[in-house]
Image (cartoon, rainbow, N blue to C red):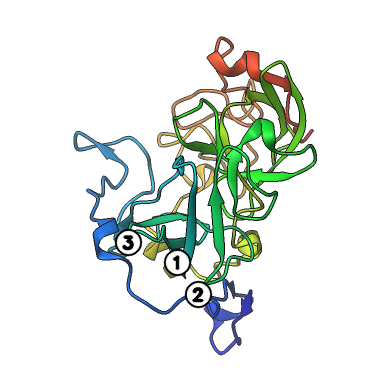
Amino acid sequence: MKRIRPTTPGQRGMVTTDYKDLTKKKPEKSLTKSLHRKRGRSRGKITARHRGGGSKKLYRQVDFRQNYFGETLTITSVEYDPYRSAFIALTNNGSGVKRYILAYDGAKVGDKIKIDEKSPIKEGNRMVLKNISVGTFVHNIEIKPGRGGQMARSAGAYARVLAHDAGHTQLTMPSGEIRVVASDGLATVGVVSNTSHREQVVGKAGKNRLRGRRPRVRGSAMSPVAHPHGGGEGRGGIGLKGGPKTPWGKKAYGVKTRKRKKYSNQHIIKRRKTKR
């Protein structure tokens, strides 16, 4: 992390990611494309508030499957990705095929990555979950074999292999939740890169505008017509019958939003710990 010198009020307390170890090159042109930016709208109507603006950016096509058994990849560059918190690595399989993958913590140019059904327990290597020893940290985990990695993909994320049992693998997730996935699915050994991402301090509103996040207004600062928390003299408390509510009158804060009949409930052994 890099602490900015407090030469302006906005930079006082600002902490940013240090990109000095990244490769200074333009993104691979054949693996980039422009995405239509919806700005929080669906069919012209706002469906996600406080979204809009932001810097122009290119999407990098990241290979989350990495299911070519027998391949050995060489990292040719470690790069920044504007669409995710983690860094990405450009790899070459020796036959001239280039692919972007999620960079693991400590990834360097020249590192070799092996993809096979069973390979050495080494950071970056990708293999079938049942062949990964208990206690190992893994990321980019497949929920269903062949679908590609869907879990533990953000900066600094990882899951710990807890046990193997009857064709299933138990994982301890970053949230503390213990869940089951198929042992035939693939996972990458190690922790996702940019582990210090959570220590970032934005410092000023303009930086959030560049990310496409528009300002939010507190409900208690609005009028009673605009929000259930609005009105009152000075800084009035919420004081509503039934507790805090959303702008549309639904209960907020601590209300369970997960569907009771969600298909993946059967795969969760132990729920995550919630703050009281």
Image point 60% across, 87% down: which residue?
5
Pinpoint residue 235: horizontal percent, then vertical percent.
62, 49
Quadrant, the N terminus = bottom right
Seen from the viewer's position, the closer of residues 147 and 154 is 147
The kind of residue tagged 1 is: Tyr
Residue position marked by numbered label 1 in the rendering: 80
The label shown at residue 127 is none
Is there a contact, CB below 8 Å, between mark 2 and mark 1? Answer: yes
Quarter of the picture containing the C terminus is top right
SS type, badge 2: loop
Pick the residue in front: 102 or 18: 102
- Identify the residue at the far top of this view: 261
- Above or below, 195 relative to 48: below
Three-letter amino acid code at disc 2?
Leu
Q: Is residue 9 above or below residue 126?
A: below
Dot 2 or dot 3: first in sequence order is 2
At mark 1, the secondary structure is: loop
Q: Are marks 2 and 3 in contact (CB under 8 Å)?
A: no
Locate residue 176 relative to residue 217 in the image: left or right.
right
Q: Earlier in the sequence, mark 2 or mark 1?
A: 2
User: Which callout, 2 or 3, points to the residue nearer the camera?
Assistant: 3
- Check residue 96 in the rendering and tell me which mark sits there, or answer none: 3
Q: Residue at x 59, y 62 (%)?
A: 194
- Residue at (57, 72) in percent of width and height: 16
The residue identified by callout 2 is: 22
Q: Position of residue 28 (x, y in %)?
A: 31, 65
- Residue, x 46% and y 32% (percent of image)? 247
The residue furthest left is: 43
Residue 240 image point, x, y percent:
61, 27
Disc 2/disc 1 C-alpha distance (Å): 7 Å
- Give the alpha-carbon distance from disc 1 to disc 3, as whole Å: 22 Å
